């Protein structure tokens, strides 16, 4: 069963996502998928290029319906609008307002929630969605 985690009170979701992705790569995680709306993915793509000038975080951005070229399929971070585009990865980081579709095919789902009231309300709805389906949820409070 998918392990569901919520990381609350994140000051900057994209910066936190970059840190989380770097940590996953350093830990040897074989692949991480990030699902979000297209505009969020575009901002995350730019952030990953400039996050750490001393380190490259290999990633690819896939539009809905796109498949990566064969030579890029082993890229460890995939940015997608729909999680099922990269279901072979063990970890899904979700930055959308609605529950992540297809999250069940991942070993772990990580929801990143900022301090914004609207985002927190959307996170409550996602939490209820996962809990109603019987998933145990871990809560992490991020401190500055």
Image (cartoon, rainbow, N blue to C red):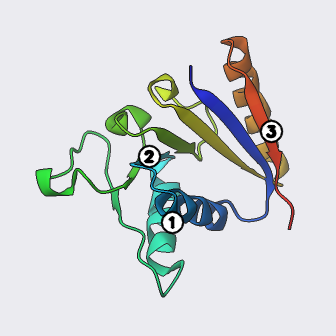
Q: Pinpoint residue 86: horizontal percent, then vertical percent.
A: 35, 39
- The residue mark sitting in front, 1 or 3, is 3
Residue in view at x 50 percent, y 64 percent: 26
Which residue is the site of mark 1? Answer: 43
Q: Nearer the viewer, residue 55 or 115?
A: 55
Q: Quadrant of residue 12?
A: bottom right
How far across and down, in percent of the image, does residue 46 sit?
Answer: 46, 72
Residue under label 3: 139
Mark nearer the N terminus (2 vs 1):
2
Q: Earlier in the sequence, mark 3 or mark 2?
A: 2
Given this view, does label 2 or label 1 mark the residue nearer the observer?
A: 2
Give neighbour class at mark 3: few <14, some 14-19, many 20+ (Cα, 10 Å). Answer: few
CA distance for labels 2 and 1: 15 Å
At 65% across and 31% down in the image, what residue appears? 4
Residue at image point 69% right, 37% down: 5
Q: Residue furthest left?
A: 70
Residue that label 2 marks: 33
Q: Position of residue 122 (x, y in %)?
A: 74, 37
Residue drawn 62% across the image and 29% down it: 3
Distance from the alpha carbon under mark 3 to that under mark 2: 20 Å
Residue sitting nearer the eye, 137 or 47: 137
The image quarter in which residue 67 lies: top left
Q: Which image quarter holds the N terminus? A: top right
> At numbered mark 2, what does the secondary structure look like: helix, strand or loop?
strand
Front one among 66 and 34: 34
Closest to the observer: 16 or 119?
16
Vertically, is 10 above or below 94? Answer: below
Q: Quadrant of the C terminus?
A: bottom right
């Amino acid at each position: 069963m998918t392990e569901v985690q919520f990381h609350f009170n994140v000051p900057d979701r994209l910066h936190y996502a970059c840190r989380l992705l770097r940590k996953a790569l350093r830990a040897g995680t074989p692949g991480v998928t990030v699902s979000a709306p297209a505009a969020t993915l575009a901002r995350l793509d730019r952030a990953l290029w400039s996050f750490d000038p001393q380190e490259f975080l290999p990633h690819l951005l896939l539009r809905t319906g796109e498949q990566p070229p064969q030579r890029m399929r082993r890229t460890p971070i995939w940015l997608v609008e729909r999680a099922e585009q990269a279901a072979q990865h063990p970890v899904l980081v979700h930055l959308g307002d609605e529950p992540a579709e297809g999250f069940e095919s991942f070993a772990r789902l990580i929801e990143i929630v900022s301090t914004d009231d609207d985002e927190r309300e959307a996170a409550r709805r996602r939490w209820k969605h996962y809990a109603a389906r019987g998933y145990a949820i871990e809560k992490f409070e991020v401190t500055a």
